Image (tube, rainbow, N blue to C red):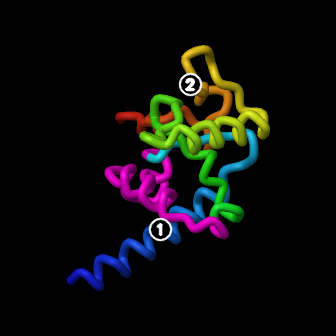
Amino acid sequence: MKKEKEIQETSFFKEVYKLVKKVPKGKVTSYGRIAALLGKPRASRAVGYALNALSKTQEQKVPWQRVINSQGKISFRGDTGRSILQKKILEDEGVKFSVNETVDFHLYGWPNLILNSAPRKKRK
């Protein structure tokens, strides 16, 4: 059972990396948005685990810095160096932070949809 779960996690992690690579420079998305786009809307924490599991080599290929929390903030707890690095990389890509250290998803969100707002079907 454990082996099967490890295989599934590895497969999920690869899906996360493939999708995160599509986030363009100067844009951000959230852990929850990545999870939802992968068809697993309750797996936002697993998206975070996947990005945290990146090796130094993988970090050069997967733009991990473009994934932030649903409040528009950087989410590294206990690793201030990492959060400072993430903010610097994003700013270098043209992403602006507000006074309260948040990113406006209306301006910088990817895909170009406001989080948690899917078009509703009209009732007949």
**SS at badge 1:** helix
Q: Which residues are magenta?
A: 32-58
Q: Is residue 43 magenta?
A: yes
Question: What residue did someone put label 2 on?
Answer: 102
Please say if 16 is above or below 121: below
Tell whether 78 sits left or right of 58.
left
Please say if 110 is above or below 3: above
Q: Is residue 112 visible?
A: no
Q: Amino acid at mark 1?
A: Phe
Q: Which of disc 2 and disc 1 is earlier in sequence?
A: 1
The residue depicted at 65 percent of the width and 36 percent of the height is 87
Q: Amino acid at mark 2?
A: Thr
Please say if 55 is above or below 93: below
Labels 1 and 2 touching (C-beta < 8 A): no
Instruction: Find the distance from the CA under tag 1 to the CA under tag 2.
Output: 26 Å
Q: Is residue 64 magenta?
A: no
Numbered badge on residue 13 = 1
Local crowd at mark 2 within 10 Å, few (<14), some, or many (≥20)?
some
Identify which residue, 63 or 83, lies in the foreground. 83
From this viewpoint, which residue is outermost toward the left? Answer: 1
